[in-house]
Image (tube, rainbow, N blue to C red):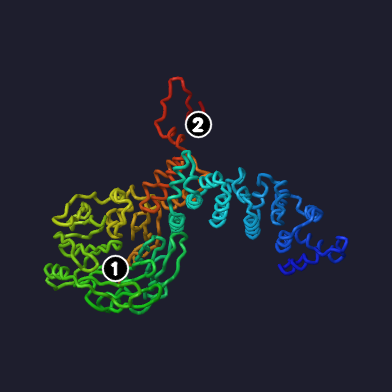
Amino acid sequence: MARLTEDGAARLLRRAVRRRADGSRGARARRAWRRLVRACAAGDAAAQEAVRTTELTDPEVLELLAAGPADSTDRAAWLTLLGQRTQRQALDPDGTLLGLAYWAATLETRGRLRAVLAAEGDGEAVRAVVGAEQRDRVAAMSYDELDLLGRRLAEHGRYDELRRLALDLPMAKAVAAARLLPAGELGEDSASTCLAALAACSPQGLRAVLERLPRRTVLSHRRGSAQVSFSPDQAELAISTTQLPPETVIPRVLTETVRLVTGESTLRHRQQGRTPVHVHSILHLGDEILRMESPLAYPGNAMSRLHPRDESIPVQGPETLSELRRASTGAVAVTVSGLGFVDRHAVRRRHVAVPRITEVIDAYAEGEQRMECHLATLPEHGLLAVTVADHVLVLDESGTVLHDEHQAGYMSAFLAPDRLAIIPDVPHPQEQRYEILTLAGSGRARREKGSPRSWAALDELRGIALDDEFAHWIVGPTYEALRDEAAPESLRNGDRRMLLAISPYGDMFVTSRLEGPLPLSRYEGDRRARCWGTLELHSPYLPTAREALEQPLLRATPRQWHHVRELRTKVGDPAVRRALALLEHTLADRFGADIALGDGPAVAAGPHDLALDPDRTE
């Protein structure tokens, strides 16, 4: 039977409602009514909507009931769509059948059911999803469906069911539901504290955290020698991969972005020419991707913007000494006479003279040789730390020197706006410890010793956004660090794996699984290009955190509280830690007595207690 249009259903209904003088239908009206009833029985949306908006007589209602589906579940939804609320409530007083029909229906039918219930001001939509048999299916609802459901509950003052709904959902959906409760309706029992904590959070912020967390512990990417950079929100990884195609000796440089949640990559730039390209560094700014490079045939460092558009940033001004780092306005690097900025959307560099940098370089090297240095930044506070020659300088982005420490350092990194970690330049790197300088407003900085190089030292600094090179250094030498038993399990492997980068909070690690060195005769470029392997991204704990946050609270157990409590200590990202802390608080409130019961020491067995052997026999 062909589907009716809205206009066709309206014309058919006008014919069907015509009556003779004695109140009976004529032949055309009877045919129109029978066709309309058959269309409603076949599930025609236009016909059902036309009937729903019409006042029917008792005999007409009986005819519709006779034509309806025999299955009680389908019948409940069918009566709802026809506007027969009284008949549906007689069939399904508690809404259980409507709930089953809702979950079995198509998306289009679900939308119509919601629209009908909302138009009639019927709170039975609640029972369609939170009835006793349906609570376990709540997690399958979309955010829009839950928002509609929660608002209907609040409008009808069904706060008991709204509170129960909030305590059954996954975390992000639970927060959205709890925020619909008025302040005076959070309850008076122990759950009120939990609901207040949920309502104090931002559902959009929690969803944003979940949407960027990886789903897999290990993501594998293409082969090559790579430079990488995490985006500021750690949702993407920018990769500049140098490859040597088998058909040519000329390297090819590919720049991509990889979505860490799915592993999906997007090619941003491809470069191949007769002159090999030496990729110094790549920097992901979120809305832009910058790369520092230099053709081997030319001196100096060239920069290019690869995203959102491909454009070269002309070589101009003083020579660059450091790699690119983030700044509040874009990117920054150290030059022989100050700071070189590449502001967002700018096509030219902006130079800020810093006479003290020039003085330090001239005094140390007498201006006769090019000197490299290390730059660390704290963009949100506009601070920079320059480790050059035998000095460590702390500056603001205007070039003002805030602190000048006379010390030969290998690199430095901010632990806080007033705390700086410095790696001294000593003869035996394996014995190095970093030092922490607390920068006072006036007077000498206070010093204290940090931990020796190890994975334990990285754990001590968990929760601090560390400079990538500093985090890379602190876990140990490039190859030896991954042989340490303290390294995350997915990183510990007997094959030739090299650590390339660590995310700011130490939750993700980029490695290259090596298949063998590439002879230098093949490519005289970046020495790191000798080691070509498969790129891997390791996320030891973030996928587990995502799984815990996505699981409905309805399915939680007391054991999960201990699991979440331990997991939170292994994650460094503050946003993820806050979400796990909220989950821990919610579970503690839900299973307080059970947790307290299972958290103490076990009772010692008595001399007459039964015991089981390993084969599970007495």
Q: Amino acid at mark 2?
A: Asp
Of marks 1 and 2, the one in the foreground: 1
Q: Nearer the viewer, residue 171 or 376?
A: 171
Q: Is residue 253 left or right of residue 190?
A: left
Q: Nearer the viewer, residue 466 or 185?
A: 185
Q: If the image is split into quadrants, where does the N terminus sit?
A: bottom right
Q: Is residue 144 visible?
A: yes
- Report helix, strand or loop for mark 1: loop
Q: Amino acid at mark 1?
A: Leu
Q: Nearer the viewer, residue 143 or 522?
A: 143
Q: Position of residue 363 (x, y in %)?
A: 11, 68
Residue 548's place in the image compared with 347, above or below, is: above
Q: Is residue 509 left or right of residue 473?
A: right
Q: Quadrant of residue 22?
A: bottom right
The residue indicated by pointer 2 is: 615
The tag on residue 415 is none
Q: Quadrant of residue 331?
A: bottom left
Number of marks in picture: 2
Mark 1 and mark 2: span between their CA atoms? 62 Å
Q: Nearer the viewer, residue 563 or 56?
A: 56
Most distant residue in the front direction: 21
Sequence-wise first label, 1 or 2: 1
Q: Position of residue 112 (x, y in %)?
A: 65, 59
- Report helix, strand or loop for mark 2: loop
Q: Quadrant of residue 283?
A: bottom left
Q: Position of residue 52 (x, y in %)?
A: 72, 59
Within-10-Å neighbours for mark 2: few <14, some 14–19, many 20+: few
Q: Is residue 85 left or right of residue 66?
A: left
Q: Is residue 521 visible?
A: no
Please say if the residues under marks 1 and 2 sit with CB atoms less than 8 Å apart.
no
Within-10-Å neighbours for mark 1: few <14, some 14–19, many 20+: many
The residue indicated by pointer 1 is: 324
